[in-house]
Amino acid sequence: MTEAALRREVLRKRPDYLIPALTGVLLLIGLQAVYSATFALGVRQYGSVGYFVTRQSMWAGVGLIMFIVGSRVNYRRWIAWSPWIMLGCLGALAAVLVPSLGLTRYGATRWLQIGPFGVQPSEFIKLSLILYVSAWLATRGERLRSWSSGFLPFVIIVGLVGGLIMLQPDLGTTLIILFVTAILFFVGGADLRQFLVLAVAGLAAMAMLIAGAGYRSDRWEAFVNPWDDPAGKGFHIIQLLIALGSGGVTGLGIGASRQKFFYVPGSHTDGIFAIIGEEVGFVGAILVIAVFAALVWRGFKVASAAPDQYGGLVAVGITCWLGFQALINIGGITRSIPLTGIPLPFISYGGSSLAVSMAAIGILFNISKYGLPSRQVAPAPA
């Protein structure tokens, strides 16, 4: 079926409007939570109550433009564009490591200064890698099961990206990239033995990375028993748990958080879910989780109905990325897993994360517009 014929078929297909609706709910929750968590910090650091929420709103506007572009461009066009986007993101990742270009914050060099804003290339590499790897996998066919023409090139591609990110360093983003690309590799048709080798190698590498840096070992010790050092290693997680516990069932009320007054480190970034739990309680926190779960469900529905392998892989990659990132963030705050320091999608303060997540949702929404009659078999992309 030609692209023109495919477009004629999809004109009759209703797109999944629930995807942008759920995203909009998360975005509004995020703007309110950012304002609540930062008005004191804004006054203290910048003399402005609305400093942080104003910047987040500006990035939300950028994200809306990126969503519109992603939703209107035929998703198959990304097949040809993805290598160039990937090269640009790799160049930006390398530029971060140049002392005169990279911007260091909180002991890590992850940003490029562009005008008044700091842009984080590692956020954009998530989407570009999904687009590129999906296109690469869709063209491999049976060659993907070969160790020399399937497994090895895949490891080189992902290893290069992961290595550049770990030089910043950023273990949380690296873990997300490894997880998402491994899922794509398996869904794309890899041999089970290849997938198992990849999983074992990934777990071994993660263990060495944790053991090789003192602050990562401290996070593990804080996860195991934060009360051994409540004023040191365990301070962060204890304050997060106090915030969640203080909210009870229904919360203290919107804007009434006490832990945001300089008790919870990163209360507007990685720790924002704790502030949400404190203000709207267990009920509100569960509702936020439910919205994420519904978004993941719709994402997998889009993947299963995609008209070709490339569309299905991109939908799986985007869905797994956003869902896994939310799971890691919430898991760390609730002390279900060790803290890793990654943002909660659409909610945490951070322009790069918000903008690229909105772009990804736009592409996912575009894929939902396309489908083939159930009697037809979807062709692989050229």
Image (cartoon, rainbow, N blue to C red):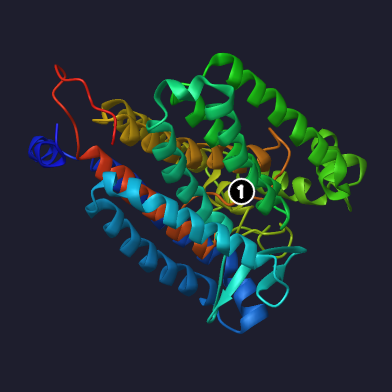
Above or below, comparing residue 230 to residue 203 in the picture: below
Which one is nearer the viewer's eye here, 321 or 333? 321
Which one is nearer the viewer's eye here, 248 or 188? 188
The C terminus lies in which quarter of the figure? top left
Dot 1: element: helix
- Decide if residue 38 is on the left or right side of residue 28: right
Residue 373: % across, % down: 13, 23
- Decide if residue 147 is on the left or right side of residue 361: right
Above or below, comparing residue 72 to residue 101 in the picture: above
- Decide if residue 65 is on the left or right side of residue 181: left
Which one is nearer the viewer's eye here, 229 or 116? 116
Which residue appears at 67% of the width and 79% of the height? 44
Which one is nearer the viewer's eye here, 214 or 30? 214
- Decide if residue 199 is on the left or right side of residue 12: right
Furthest residue toward right: 228
Near mark 1 (Cα within 10 A), the count class, few <14, some 14-19 or many ≥20, is many
The N terminus lies in which quarter of the figure? top left
Q: Is residue 128 visible?
A: yes
Residue 263: % across, % down: 74, 59
Above or below, comparing residue 346 to residue 116 in the picture: above
Which residue appears at 20% of the width and 40% of the height? 369
Above or below, comparing residue 204 to residue 326 in the picture: above
Instruction: Name the residue type under label 1.
Output: Val
Q: Which residue is mark 1?
A: 161
Which residue appears at 52% of the width and 53% of the height? 125
Residue 135: % across, % down: 39, 39
The quarter of the picture where residue 113 lies is bottom right
The quarter of the picture where residue 43 lies is bottom right
Q: Is residue 291 visible?
A: no
Residue 65: % across, % down: 31, 64
